[in-house]
Amino acid sequence: MNHSDFVSEPLASGKFLISGEWIAASETVPVRNPANVQEEVGRTAICSQGDVLAAIESAHAAFLGWRLTPLDDRIARIRAAATHLATVAVELTRLFVRENGKVWAEAEVDVRRSIEVLSGATACIEAWFKGEMYSGQQTVNALRRPRGVTAVISPWNSPVILTFKRVIPAILTGNTVVLKPPSYCPLTISEAMRILASHLPDGVINIVSGPGHRIGEVLCTHPAVKTISFIGSTETGKRILQWAAPTLKKVYLELGGNDPAILLPDVTLDESTLRALRTGILRAAGQVCSAIKRVYVHRSRFVELVEKMTKSFQEVKVGNGLLPEAMMGPLNNQAQYEFVKGLIEDAQRQNHEVIQVGQVLEPDRWDDGYFILPTIVTGVRNEDMLVQCEQFGPVIPIVPYDDLEEAIAFANGSEFGLRASIWGRDLTVARELSQRLEAGGVFFNQHSVFQDLKLDFPGVKWSGVGRETAWGNFELFCDTYGFAYMS
Ligand code: NAD
């Protein structure tokens, strides 16, 4: 199959959605293909604060009817949308590669799992919605009701799956939504939402895009918005929490990460371990909240690791994600590209050892996009910027440690606490060690995601507040109340 055969014009390009109407924005900015910045994939609508107010009013008005819609009807609509989405999964994947930069296989997984969210959530909501009964002299039924307008704000790195994981439980439980897609990668999620919204009453989903601060200020301060579900950087999360305080909204924040991987002295550095490490570091060119962003290895294995990881990185084919052989794509946007390049240049200026390897797939097109080769940096100290910041790119510092206490102190010595991983031979040792790691999830001999989409393990410290939004997490969007009567 030649993936480049699929050409689709994003219908939602340059538009925003209010009360079921797609409105062409008077101001738009181009969305460029990060593998070829000359190519305009579509346009982002730049909404005004007035547009955001109209979207909130639309969602508020729709809530009054949607919350009373029988659950069966809501389920049937979401299932119909899932079937519809499955018919355009290939077009969505192609659009996603073109606007995001992920390679085909990565984008395909995102789209497929997003559609699974719809079927998974509809399969288990009925039992959950009935609530629980507590019997005694008095019978108490714990019941749920939707809260109202939900603001969903999404990041550019994985906007499709991360948006579906929140929008679907929100609307299934009877809430309505105002979605703010990311400015850099708004098209695929808007297209997917266009299909979803076509199965719903007008106003249940509304979409407004544009500068985060401008849109966010109205969304996060408006009294009619009852719940905010935000995924993005820690800095923006803090701002949102401040805005939401005066009206005491329920706020869920899934934020940045700087995940450590600790390689124990007995780690087996065979091909499969190296491949798992490489995937944990380089998936989506490192632009994953829960990617390995720093590696700590016992000093006795340091030289071996650097040598073997360099060999492993050398195999990575870097290029346009539409090329079937591409294993790693470009960075998504210019700001991120400049930031990561700056980190590498800084490491070079400080005379750290910077190892850049990999295979360039189309050398004459390398400068057309935001490509960076897989990069290993050694000679850095734990307190250096490259180790302490969230680089969000294909550059990984490797730091040796002398004993386990030092490794734990290094790993926990960060404001972030999203995920961590332990690599070694003994599961029991790893499980014990996991108790001491300040992270919302710890992996053993892998560093990826929790594959069951209904599992929910929020980040700790500055990586999150509240619960993580898994598709089975309906209570995020509901209030629980007790209904009591004498038995
Ligand atoms: P970002 O915070 O810049 O933007 C996220 C979203 O918020 C975008 O839609 C943006 O337009 C909007 N926004 C920006 N300023 C805003 C404001 N003042 N008020 C309201 N909205 C605002 O983050 P990003 O660069 O798009 O995404 C990358 C970050 O997201 C990384 O830190 C990554 O680790 C994090 N992330 C976390 C998770 C997780 O599950 N913990 C998942 C994916 C990404």
Image: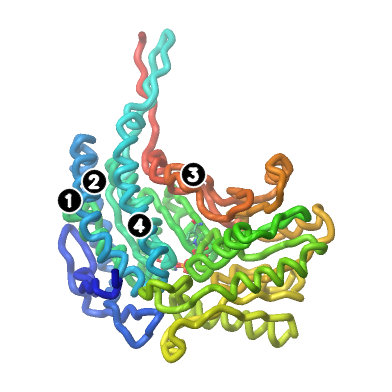
Residue assigned mark 3: 456
* Foreground disc of the pair 1, 4: 1
The first of marks 3 and 2 along the sequence is 2
Q: Amino acid at mark 4?
A: His
Expressed as whole percent of the image width and height from the top left, the position of residue 75 reads 23, 40
Disc 1 to disc 4, C-alpha distance: 27 Å
Q: Is residue 73 above or below residue 166?
A: above
Disc 2 to disc 4, C-alpha distance: 28 Å
Expressed as whole percent of the image width and height from the top left, the position of residue 401 reads 80, 62
In this rendering, position of residue 188 left or right of residue 446: left
The first of marks 1 and 3 along the sequence is 1
Residue assigned mark 1: 199
Residue assigned mark 2: 78
In this rendering, position of residue 187 left or right of residue 377: left
Verify CB contact (< 8 Å) between mark 2 and mark 1: yes
Q: Quadrant of residue 27?
A: bottom left
**In the image, which disc is placed on residue 55?**
none
Disc 3 to disc 4, C-alpha distance: 28 Å
The first of marks 1 and 4 along the sequence is 1
Disc 1 to disc 3, C-alpha distance: 28 Å
- The foreground one among 389 and 17 is 389
Expressed as whole percent of the image width and height from the top left, the position of residue 273 reads 63, 58
Residue assigned mark 4: 222
Report the label total.
Answer: 4
The first of marks 2 and 1 along the sequence is 2
